[in-house]
Structures are given as C-alpha cells and as structure tokens.
Image (cartoon, helix red, strand yellow):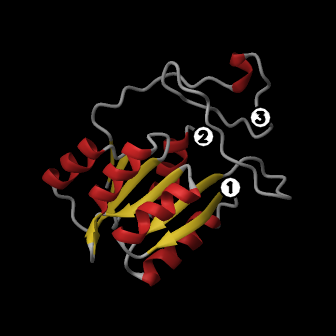
Amino acid sequence: MLHPAPDTVARPRRQNADRGGEASPAGIRSMTAPGRPVRRAAPVPGSADGPVARVFLVDDHVAMRRAVRHLLESTRRIAVIGESGSAREAVPRILVAHPDVAVVDVRLPDGSGIEVCRVVRTADPRIRVITVSTVDDPQTRREAYRAGVTTFIVKQVDGRALVDAVWEAVGGS
C-alpha cells in the first residue's frame, strides 16, 4: 500500500521554462517550496534518456537491496548510488552520497529506519525519504511522517508503486 504524507498539499508543478529557463528535453518538472532552489536530478553520463533520480537503499537484507536495485535501475532513469545494511552506517553514507531519495526499511537490526529518516532530514531536508515496511501499522506510519518521511510503502505492493514514489519524491514524471 502506498501512503503519501497526509499533510501534503499538491502544488502545481512548474516546468523549468516557467522560471525563465528552458524545459528539460525529457519534460522533467521540478516542484519546490517557496524560496527553495529547484533541485534537478543529475543526468547519467552518456545517457540520452535525460535526467535520472539518484537513490540510496537501506535494508538489512542483501537480497531485498539487490531486487530493489534491479527494479529501480531497470527504468534506466533511476540510478542507485549507494547501499547500506544498517542504521549506523546509513546516515553518514547518505549524507556523503547526497541522493535525491533514500529508500529506507523501517526495521533495521541496529536501529530504526524512522530515526535514520529523522537524522538525515534534519541534516539535509532536501533529501527525500521513502520508508518501506512489511507491516502497515498506523502508529508506525504516523511516526514516520513526523520524522519527515515523504512516502510510506508496504513491501507487498507492486514494484511500480516504488518507482512512482521515487519520481513523485523528486518532482519528476
């Protein structure tokens, strides 16, 4: 199940041309809060497909990280730029890698993915966080949103929901 942040207000997305620049060739749009600079995904070197979303994965199961990496990178417009299997190593790695989006498991062996989100979003609020969980618990979901999670996803959803959530988090299409 896909759960976007409950207090999120849909803002109209403006193409780069609206800011006096040119729209990107792929038609990627940027959505920002007032006063915030537009954040664009970096292009993949040598890619004619246009901008990509840069994603960091945090899950203690190697097989899950491999499956999610394969799913996201199969779109050719999402690049997984880093991985971590624990909360302790995730925070510094995310802050150094500076992804557009971190996809974080709620339950990690050495801590909470929600706490990872809280620390990352406090240090750099431009990094969006999508949490994934095996259980759709309303209390956990509320805690995640209070920590700054962009989207809460239950692992049993169709893989396309995760891809869509990544693009929604970066303001792409």
Residue annotated with mark 1: 77
Residue at figure coordinates x 51%, y 71% from the top left: 83
Which residue is at the front of the view, 82 or 2? 82
Q: CA distance from mark 1 to mark 2?
A: 10 Å
- Residue 172 marker: 2
Q: What residue is shown with label 3?
A: 24
Q: Give the structural element (helix, strand or loop) at label 2.
A: loop
Task: Report how far apart the C-alphas of labels 1 and 3 lie in the structure.
Answer: 14 Å
Could you tell me the amino acid type at mark 2?
A: Gly
The tag earlier along the polypeptide, 2 or 3, is 3
Looking at the rendering, which quadrant does residue 47 occupy?
bottom right
Contact (Cβ within 8 Å) of mark 1 with mark 2: yes
Label 2 to label 3: alpha-carbon separation: 11 Å
What is the three-letter code of the residue carrying label 1?
Answer: Arg
Q: Position of residue 23 (x, y in %)?
A: 76, 28
Q: Where does residue 114 sit, x and y in percent of width and height?
A: 28, 56
Residue 20, x across and y down, in percent:
75, 16
Residue plotted at (42% across, 61% down): 91
The earlier-in-sequence mark between 1 and 2 is 1
In percent of the image, x 61 and y 55: which residue is there? 54
Report which quarter residue 145 is drawn in.
top left
Q: Secondary structure at mark 1?
A: loop
